[in-house]
Amino acid sequence: GAVVSQHPSRVICKSGTSVKIECRSLDFQATTMFWYRQFPKQSLMLMATSNEGSKATYEQGVEKDKFLINHASLTLSTLTVTSAHPEDSSFYICSAKSGTAAHEQYFGPGTRLTVT
Amino acid sequence: DAKTTQPTSMDCAEGRAANLPCNHSTISGNEYVYWYRQIHSQGPQYIIHGLKNNETNEMASLIITEDRKSSTLILPHATLRDTAVYYCIDNTDKLIFGTGTRLQVFP
């Protein structure tokens, strides 16, 4: 089946620094990738939709200047959390779509970000 | 926002069938019903999807009512590894997760 990886799986950074999370589709090309955030005991919240070669579309309430998304190739999207603060500590999950149907969307294992 | 409603939690004995209900009363004609699950601290896993007809695969069965306003995910023989949060979603182009049902399978 389709595989999506994320790197790193866990990261700890200091407040005020930036951290980059990578999302890769390993065995398929993904024209669309999605980024979600999940706080403890809560559901996944869609942050943005990223199409290869174009600007990401952010969901309402998500700061585009704080969460920079780059989708430079059909197999790689990156999320950069800029000037991180402790409240940005969360589980970040990406997904990649291999086709046009929603069920052709495959999720990565997630990245646990802790900001100290 | 998510358009589906599910019970917050359910328990099921190992080996028994787990029946997880979902209401999607505002589903439109071209929207599928999708089920995903998330085991603790992992990414969501696709289970099954359907439009109008009941569906079955190696993981589960999906029963959709004739009016399409609700559905039931059936895990025929639940195991301890099926303990997870189960999400029912009825969007088309984006997967918007609701609160899901936390299924606890006990020995």
Image: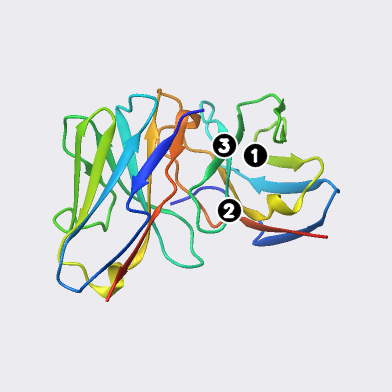
Front residue of this view, candidates A56 and A94:
A94
Q: Name the residue under label 3.
A: B34
Specify the subunit that label 1 lies on.
B
Q: Is residue A116 left or right of residue A9?
A: left
Quadrant in the rendering for residue A87: bottom left
Badge count = 3
Distance from the alpha carbon under mark 1 to that under mark 3 = 13 Å
Which of the two discs, 2 and 3, sits closer to the camera? 2
The kind of residue on which mark 1 rests is Lys
Q: Residue A3 carries which label?
A: none
Note whether A59 is above or below A84 in the view shown: above
Which of the two discs, 1 and 3, sits closer to the camera? 3
The kind of residue on which mark 2 rests is Ile
Distance from the alpha carbon under mark 2 to that under mark 3 = 17 Å
Coordinates of residue A23 in the picture (x, y in percent): 31, 42
The residue at the point 16 percent across, 38 percent down is: A55
Front residue of this view, candidates A77 and B94:
A77
Q: Is residue B47 left or right of residue B58?
A: left
Q: Which mark is residue B69?
A: 1
The residue at the point 40 percent across, 23 percent down is: A100
- Tag 3 or tag 1, which sits nearer the N-term? 3
Front residue of this view, candidates A39 and B63:
A39
Specify the subunit that label 3 lies on.
B
The kind of residue on which mark 3 rests is Tyr
User: Marks 2 and 1: CB-CB under 8 Å?
Assistant: no
Coordinates of residue B63 in the picture (x, y in percent): 73, 34
- Tag 3 or tag 2, which sits nearer the N-term? 3
Element at label 1: loop
Distance from the alpha carbon under mark 2 to that under mark 1 = 27 Å
Q: Where, quadrant-wise, is the C terminus of chain B in this rendering? A: bottom right
Q: Is residue B89 left or right of residue B72?
A: left
